[in-house]
Image (cartoon, rainbow, N blue to C red):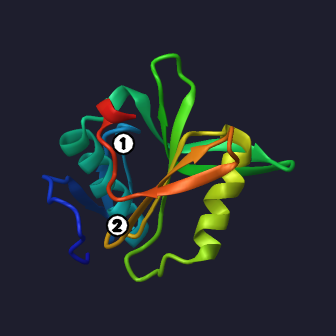
Amino acid sequence: MLPLNLPHYAHKIQTVDGKNYIFDVLRKKYVGLTPEEWVRQHFTHFLMRYKGYPQGLLANEVQICLNGTKKRCDTVLYDRALNARMIVEYKAPQVEITQTVFDQITRYNMVLRVQYLIVTNGLSHYCCRIDYEKGSYIFLPDIPDYKDL
C-alpha cells in the first residue's frame, strides 16, 4: 500500500485465501484491505491517537437513508448524547479530491446535519465547519482536536 500523509500505526493485516484483510478497531473485525480502507484505518487512528477523538464515539460504515436509497457514511463522529457531529469521507490515494467528492458528503449531510465535514484521500485532508444559521461554511486550516469541537 502507498505511504500516506498520516502517522504510521501498528496495523494488523492477515491474508486469507490470497486476499488481504486489515483489522478495524471500530468494527472490531478484519475487513478487506482496499486502498480506501487503508486510508480509513490510518485516518481513524490519527483522529484517536493524535487528535483525541474517543474511540467509543466513532463509527465506520454508518448506514443512512437518502431519498429512499440506503447509503453508507465512511466514518461518523457522535457527541456524548449520540448526535452525529462529523462525517468523514475517504477516497483512495490515487483519487483526486474534487467538487464531486464534496457533493457526495454534502448529500449525506442532508440526513445527518453535522457541524463538520472531512474529506481525505490520505494525502490531502480537507475539513469544513458548517454554520446553519448563516447558511455558510468555512474551511479550517487543520483537522480540529476533539476538545476544540
- Position of 35 with respect to 66 (left or right) is left
Q: Nearer the viewer, residue 126 or 64?
A: 126
Label 2 and label 1: CA atoms lie apart by: 17 Å
Q: Amino acid at mark 1?
A: Lys
Q: Nearer the viewer, residue 12 or 136?
A: 136
Q: Which numbered tag is attached to residue 29?
A: 1
Query: At 25% across and 78% down in the image, what residue appears?
Result: 2
User: Which numbered disc, 2 or 1, marks the residue that appears first in the sequence?
Assistant: 2
Query: At 33% across and 45% down in the image, what residue appears?
Result: 144
The residue most toward the top is 81
Query: At 69% across and 38% down in the image, what residue appears?
Result: 133
Q: Residue 117 at x, y = what percent?
A: 52, 51
Q: Residues within 10 Å of mark 1 (few under 14, many from 20)?
A: few
- Position of 130 with respect to 139 (left or right) is right
Q: Which numbered tag is attached to residue 53?
A: none
Q: Residues within 10 Å of mark 2 (few under 14, many from 20)?
A: few
Circle 2: element type: loop
Contact? badges 2 and 1 (CB < 8 Å)? no
Q: Residue 124 at x, y = what percent?
A: 35, 71
Quadrant where the image shows the C terminus = top left
- Position of 100 with respect to 6 (left or right) is right
Q: Residue 31 at x, y = what percent?
A: 40, 53
Q: Residue 53 at x, y = what percent?
A: 31, 35
Quadrant where the image shows the N terminus = bottom left
- Of the residues tagged 2 and 1, which is closer to the observer? 1
Q: Which residue is mark 2?
A: 17
Q: Can you tell which quarter of the image residue 42 is in?
A: bottom left
Q: Can you tell which quarter of the image residue 35 is in?
A: bottom left
Query: At 32% across and 56% down in the image, what residue appears?
Result: 142
The residue most toward the front is 134
- Residue 2 versus residue 56 in the image, above or below: below
- Residue 144 versus residue 17 in the image, above or below: above
